[in-house]
Image (tube, helix red, strand yellow):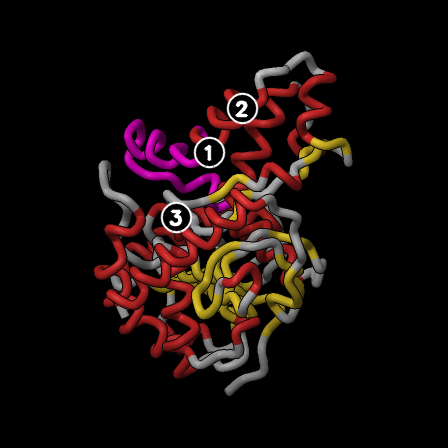
Amino acid sequence: MSKLNERKVAVVGCGFVGSASAFALMESGLFSEMVLIDVNKDKAEGEALDISHGLPFAKPMSIYAGDYKDAEDAAVVVVTAGAGQKPGETRLDLVKKNVGIFKSIIPEITKYNKDGILLIVANPVDILTSVAAKLSGFPENRVFGSGTVLDTARFKYLLGEHLDVDSRSVHAFIIGEHGDSEIAAWSSANVSGIPIHDFCEMRGHFEHEKSMKRIADDVKNSAYGIIEKKGATYYGIAMSVRRICEAIIRDEKSILPISSIQHGDFGIDGVALSMPAIVGRNGVEGSVPIKLNADEIAALQESGNTLKKVLDEAF
């Protein structure tokens, strides 16, 4: 097998999310080579050509459609392939369909690429991250999911809007499942180091419980609202993929709420879900302790149990 090419990425699946992610990765300038892989080769070729035609406005890059062998030296393999979420369908409804798809995809990737990082983006991302870890046999630090990186961005965006401050100054996490049992970690939320309730009061907001419920519900229902209006969500997740790849390729040691297999923190074991973790060139380089209150811990454990039950049924 060839040595890994640190400037190469493979994107498996060229649907809405895969092609938007490929476009975001081209714009990022992180990579000089990108291979697009899809069961529909024409679709992959079309996307590769379409994105390539903008290269005179970007950085030099080789973008082409290929097969799994072409991913053998990719530093990161982004897996977006899977059945999409339909209106009215929960992420967990997708499980059985997508576990079946992963049983054909993951062994094909690992047949050629043994040393890269597998970034799982297809939904339900937590279940599929656990499945990919089992099927690939890779060390767990090199198989993780996009998790609640996008949910956390939505949370920061809505808090920024609510408080009329730059969302980049908001430090808050959505943890647990990327889906219906996700938890807004209010206990540790702050704006520039100021506890969230104190900052809210500085900005004239005093109905904390009401605002917390509204914002957390808006985050949780964001995807459903977007799917209802335009049929799919893809730009937000594409920017999340770009952000995660940036942390890996630049070895940033950034703290991101990616989905990785848990081993006992808060009593959760053997299932992938999202908690803040240090992400760098070796993938998941460590977990970050987060302050939670008793209700949040109970909700997190419930989220873990929900996922574990689905995983046991599906795989």
Question: Label 2 belongs to which residue?
Answer: 209
Question: Label 3 belongs to which residue?
Answer: 17
Q: Secondary structure at mark 1?
A: helix
Q: Earlier in the sequence, mark 1 or mark 3?
A: 3
- Depth check, mark 1 against mark 3: the one in front is 1
Residue 240 lies, in percent from the top left, at 53, 47
Residue 39 colored in magenta in the image: no
The residue carrying pointer 1 sits among few (fewer than 14), some (14 to 19) or many (20 or more) residues within 10 Å by Cα, namely: many
Which residue is depicted at the point 58% across and 77% down?
4
Q: Please identify the quadrant where the C terminus is shown.
A: bottom left
* Residue most extreme to the front: 294
- Depth check, mark 2 against mark 3: the one in front is 2
Give the Cα distance between marks 2 and 1: 16 Å
Instruction: Specify the segment rendered in magenta.
Output: 218-239
Pointer 1 with pointer 3, Cβ within 8 A: no
Determine which of the numbered discs, if any, sits on residue 219 in the image. Answer: 1
Q: Quadrant of residue 272?
A: bottom left
Q: Is residue 148 left or right of residue 124?
A: right
Which residue is depicted at the point 36% across and 73% down?
106
Residue 237 lies, in percent from the top left, at 46, 45
Q: Earlier in the sequence, mark 2 or mark 1?
A: 2
The residue carrying pointer 3 sits among few (fewer than 14), some (14 to 19) or many (20 or more) residues within 10 Å by Cα, namely: many
* Residue most extreme to the right: 193
Q: What is the magenta segment's predominant secondary structure?
A: helix
Which residue is depicted at the point 28% across and 30% down?
228
* Residue most extreme to the bottom: 1
Which residue is depicted at the point 24% across and 51% down?
93
Q: Nearer the viewer, residue 164 or 213?
A: 213
Label 2 is placed on what type of residue?
A: Glu
Label 3 is placed on what type of residue?
A: Val
Residue 225 lies, in percent from the top left, at 34, 29
